[in-house]
Image: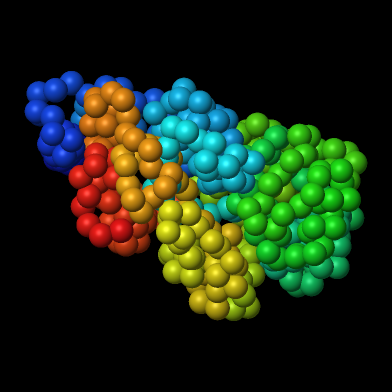
Amino acid sequence: MRARSVLALLLTGLITLAMAAVGQPASAAPTSALGSGSSYVNLAMNQWKSQANAAGIQVQYTPTGSPAGMTLYKNGGSAFAGTEAEFPSLQVADADVTRGFQYVPDVAGATAIMYNLREKSGQKVDYLHLDAVTVARIFIGTITKWSDPAISATNKGIVFPDVPIKVVLRSGRSGTTALFFDFIASTLGQEYVTWFEGNGCGSARIRPVIIECSNPSSVNNRPTTVAFGDSQQIAQFVANDNNGQFSIAFDEFGYAKTEKVPTAWVRNAAGGYVLPYAENISAALESAALRPDLTQELSGVYASKNPKTYPISAYSYITLPCGQSPDRPTCRGAYPDPGQTQTMAAFLSYVSCAGQTSMATLGYSPLPPNLSQEMAKAVGRLTDHPTGRE
């Protein structure tokens, strides 16, 4: 109880500091800020908004999926968006987002390869090892059975059943899908392009990856492919020993933890097999490159020789407005309502510090100190009170 009281006092102090940053008296009433978007980050968002709300920071969030959240934000229907996909990945040019925006990394996460599998003898498999090429080929349909030699080669001692792999995908486009297919595109190169274009999906781009197939279950005409609308549904399906048996899916690791679904050890570029634990996510993202607008370039993660690297690791972003900034051409003015500026400044300040402390228990990894500092700079851009050099 005492710990909760201390946290409440800390968060209340953040509101006061945020109001001072925008030149408002501490007695001014902040305005509720409604956000939507990524389900990848929703487990973190649920905790953040709950603790923030308890301290009077009025933030709400609906996990609509990154594309829907970014579209709603672009059209002025929400105060902020959660996303793993930038506007160009959604086929929206930065210049067309007249409202203005900045990307702010909020948490580090990993795309886990979840599965529900039994050996030919009927024994449950809970120690599956897969290399990157095998993972990629399973999800584009080149590898279709659990008895495929490529799977057996990395799992000595397991006799796999000669049954179809039931591939579980996200329906429509999503930020999680964009992240995962960026990994596939990097792993397979031209093989990915040939597959994508050969399935009537339009012209493939390696980066940013665009998933244009409106019905992923039709890809390769595979009757063993199913699709669901959000991360929670995917994890629950794979966890089900009836419908989900012999299935495999990609999803944010936190959902695998929540539903108690086993996840594959994935081979990294150093040759080791690694699970998506917090320390392995952190090790991977030491090789991530951040562009000037803080969006991520992950080819270094996929190629990282750090033996601890979990290779399908990435950041999630909060997308929100920012005041005029000569170094950020996408900044075109803050919220018209100063109360929303106060609320979001306080919320970002909380997420950057206290909000990171329990991320590992949820299946994420805390932001490194340099990105926590970038969140402070984002508050400065939002309030037109810079906190340091860009």
Q: Nearer the viewer, residue 233 or 336?
A: 336
> In the rendered view, does 230 fall on the left or right side of 372?
right
Residue 26 pos. (x, y %):
10, 29
Q: How many marks?
A: 0
Please indicate whether residue 326 sits to the left or right of residue 167 in the image: left
Residue drawn at x 42%, y 47% is 329
Q: Nearer the viewer, residue 193 or 266?
A: 193
Point 90% across, 41% down: residue: 221
Pick the quarter of the image with the N terminus: top left
Percent of width and height locating residue 212: 74, 41
**Residue in the image at 54% along x and 36% along y:** 96
> In the depicted view, which residue is nearer to us: 189 or 12?
189
Residue 109 image position (x, y, % from top left): 48, 53
Residue, x 29% and y 45% (percent of image)? 381
Q: Nearer the viewer, residue 54 or 379?
A: 379
Residue 268, position as x, y percentages in the image: 61, 71
Q: Is residue 212 visible?
A: yes
